[in-house]
Image (cartoon, rainbow, N blue to C red):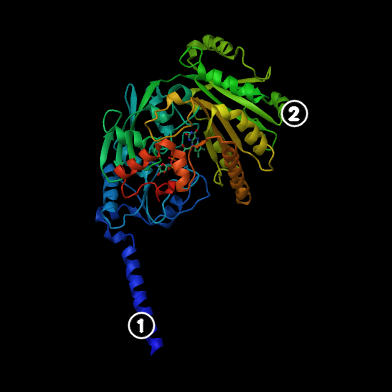
Amino acid sequence: FQLSKALVILLCLNIVVHTKQAQLQPWSPLDAPKEILQMLSRDPVTISLASTDFGHIIHQNPFAIFAPSSINDISKLIKFSNSLPIPFTIAARGQGHSVNGQSMTNDGIVVNMTELNNELRNNGNGIVVFDKYVDVGGGQRWIDVLHASLEKGLTPLSWTDYLYLSVGGTLSNAGISGQTFRFGPQISNVHELDVVTGKGDLVTCSTEKNSELFYAVLGGLGQFGIITRARIALGPAPKRVKWLRLLYNDFSAFSGDQEHLISLNGIDETNAPNYVEGFLLLNQPPLDLSFFPEIDQPRITSLVTQYGIIYIVELAKYYDENSQDHVDQEIEILLQGLKFVPTFKFEKDVSYEEFLDRVHTDELTLRAQGLWNIPHPWLDLFVPGSRMSEFNEGVLKGIILKQNITAGLVIVYPMNRTKWDDKMSAVTPNEEIFYVVDFLRATGFDNLEAYKSQNQQILQFCKDVGIEIKHYLPLNRTHEEWVEQYGLKWNAFEKRKNQFDPNKILSPGQGIFN
Ligand code: FAD
């Protein structure tokens, strides 16, 4: 009797648990209005494409993929989610070029922003170029924005190194490259946005109109709304570019010259460079010297072997055909007094488009070698300028150069905080000059753990010596780490989340509120 009583109790408990689970089922697709259902796909191939990204490290299966045919559809989807007792999560996906699952959702819905593009393009309004700005759908790629603008002799001013990224994706981070010191990041070049908020409201915003949402969304890691249109500043497009690389064997000469070059902006516009970046050549295979003339490659290799680490300043000067003579003089003036290793100055003369689209050339090579769709354990940091020499000793020489794994491409260049708007969500170190340091690695699965561990060592080194770095393209973090990342901005960030996405539906892959 005791046994059967126990069994009855267990059975009852089981029913209660199951009923609870049924109540907790977040939603059923059958609950969705027909118009939404029609746009959802559970096709395994489509699901599998949306369950990975450029990083090839994180995999999350969404419940379905949403292919909106209008901005209103996105609004309806978000409103439907909010109407449920337990809303489902929604991740906008641009080009899926994040490296750590940022555009994914587990069991939620991925919104394919490219689909919206196709629709907008068919209607002829995906990219509309005006005299001083271009109106662009949030899922459009920068390469297409460039092409459309160039047709009218115009160009956006601030770029990323790689252009096959979506406008909404880079504006959710910041969008940085060698032009940032002149024009600020891409988020500093936006006049107006259309955003579907986490409540499903379609809002037009700018510094004057609904400014809280405007500032929240720019650099907001997709947390507050889905960008469906951005109005981006344009200027006259140059025709050609002198593209230079200067080699240094000494870090302080390298960074001193980089900082000098970016300081020319605003003082001497004619003689200031249009683009300044930098990266390392390390005495590790493979040594990519493809930029340099073949005849010079042996002496560059000897330099790298001798010093172990060579720093390269990369700069560009734009010009038009009729100013060919001037540009050579301007470059001569620009290089006066710079401390690169004498005679280690290399120059190419390319079209403006070829220069901006330079990484695509590398992409094609890597794809052909089967080295594009492989894991990318990247680490992207902003480092305060005053601590860069310690960072060089402790991380670049102390960790990267010494360890037995290939560093990949290490990008190092300074930018200035005054070109960033602190009201926006993006975060930078609290110093006027800070450096972006990108460790861009590609690896097989065998070495993945070694890279993850190296990333941890770099972060630990910064912590131990008190270098207050900020993450760019931040990796999924603990709550404490997010609070630290945002620092004084955390309270405002959290408040904005409660205001614009109170049910915490959007971009769960960032791992901030989910
Ligand atoms: P996704 O990966 O699709 O999405 C990124 C995040 O933004 C997700 O959280 C997503 O939900 C959200 N999101 C996407 N679309 C929208 C939208 N319309 N509205 C709101 N939220 C949205 N970055 C630089 O700044 N400078 C560089 O030079 C640079 N070079 C790169 C080179 C390569 C080869 C790669 C792979 C990346 C590079 N990046 C660079 C990083 C890149 O800017 C980010 O990864 C960016 O998010 C990629 O855009 P995406 O369209 O692929 O975004």
Q: Amino acid at mark 2?
A: Gln
Instruction: Please report the residue visible at 59 percent of the width from the left and 23 percent of the height from the top.
Output: 255
For residue 172, side relative to residue 460 (left or right): left
Q: In the rendered image, which residue does mark 2 sit on?
A: 306
Which mark sits nearer the N-terminus, 1 or 2? Answer: 1
Q: Amino acid at mark 1?
A: Val
Q: Quadrant of residue 19?
A: bottom left
Would you call the spot at circle 2 few (<14 residues within 10 Å), some (14-19), or many (20 or more)? Answer: few
Residue 273 against residue 36 in the figure, above or below: above
Residue 254 against residue 446 in the figure, above or below: above
Q: Quadrant of the N terminus?
A: bottom left
Residue 26 disc label: none
Would you call the spot at circle 1 few (<14 residues within 10 Å), some (14-19), or many (20 or more)? Answer: few
Instruction: Please report the residue visible at 54 percent of the width from the left and 9 percent of the height from the top.
Output: 325
Q: Quadrant of residue 122?
A: top left
Give the x, y percent position of residue 396. 64, 34
Give the x, y percent position of residue 81. 29, 53
Ligand 1 found in image quarter: top left
Foreground pick, 30 / 393: 393
Q: In the rendered image, which residue does mark 1 sit on?
A: 8
Would residue 246 be seen by someone viewing this image from the given angle? no
Give the x, y percent position of residue 405. 66, 43
Would residue 216 be seen by someone viewing this image from the given angle? yes
